[in-house]
Image: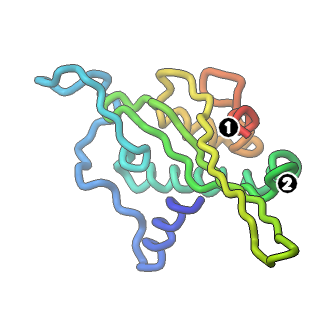
Amino acid sequence: MLFPVLALACSAAQGAAPEPPENTAQQHDDAAAPAGSTGAKSFVDAESYFTSSAELDAWYGLLRELYDDFDVVCGDTFCEGDFSNYKPLRLRCSVEEHAGTIGSCVWILAASREEIEPSTGDVEVDARTFPCEMPIVPETTVTALVDALSAPSGRAINAALPGTDSSLYDGLVECL
């Protein structure tokens, strides 16, 4: 949870909770585009979509839980084989700013393997990033996603995504 946690940690270190975007008049239940628009969809980052402190706290809490869950499941699954040091960099979801539906969610991970060249002492590095598209059903709202993954039963990474039997873990298995 590199980037979102750092933003949260920096806010906490300064003694302030993350601030909602300045435009707090946004309505999440607005299914239609604003009057006078061409009907074109406009997407924002999930963390920009949320406007209340409670929503932001839920989002950042979910991200923390997912990154912790990844660390737990990694050792028994993905973190074996060619790359054994996967690290989650960021989970990013696009949200249609008026309807609140998810366009897509991508979990970006990084991994590397290193070898020492005995004759030269050089360290040869094979570093890669893995953008893993998560199996989100079309028309899923970001609030439904947060609610489903925040349910108290088990790990968030294994929770069924809204409208499907798939989980974020399943998306990682497909990707990695």
Could you say which quadrant of the image residue 87 lies in? bottom right
At which x and y percent is residue 102? Answer: 46, 31
Tell me which amino acid carries mark 2: Gly
Q: Position of residue 171 (x, y in %)?
A: 68, 34
Is any atom of residue 67 visible in this view? no
Dot 1 alpha-carbon crowd within 10 angstroms: few under 14, some 14 to 19, many 20 or more: many
As measured in the structure, the alpha-carbon distance from the residue carrying label 1 to the one carrying label 2 is: 17 Å
For label 2, the SS is: loop
Left of 42 or right of it: where is 18?
A: right
User: Which residue bears the numbered disc 2?
Assistant: 75
Residue 115 in percent (x, y) is at 82, 66
Q: Dividing the image into 4 quarters, which one contains the C terminus?
A: top right
Q: Which residue is mark 1?
A: 168
The correct choice, above or below, for 163 with respect to 91 in the image is above
Please name whichever residue, 148 or 91, is drawn nearer the observer in this view of the structure: 91
Count of number-bearing discs: 2
Quadrant where the N terminus is found in the figure: bottom right
* 56 w.r.t. 154: above or below: below
Q: Looking at the image, can residue 75 be seen?
A: yes
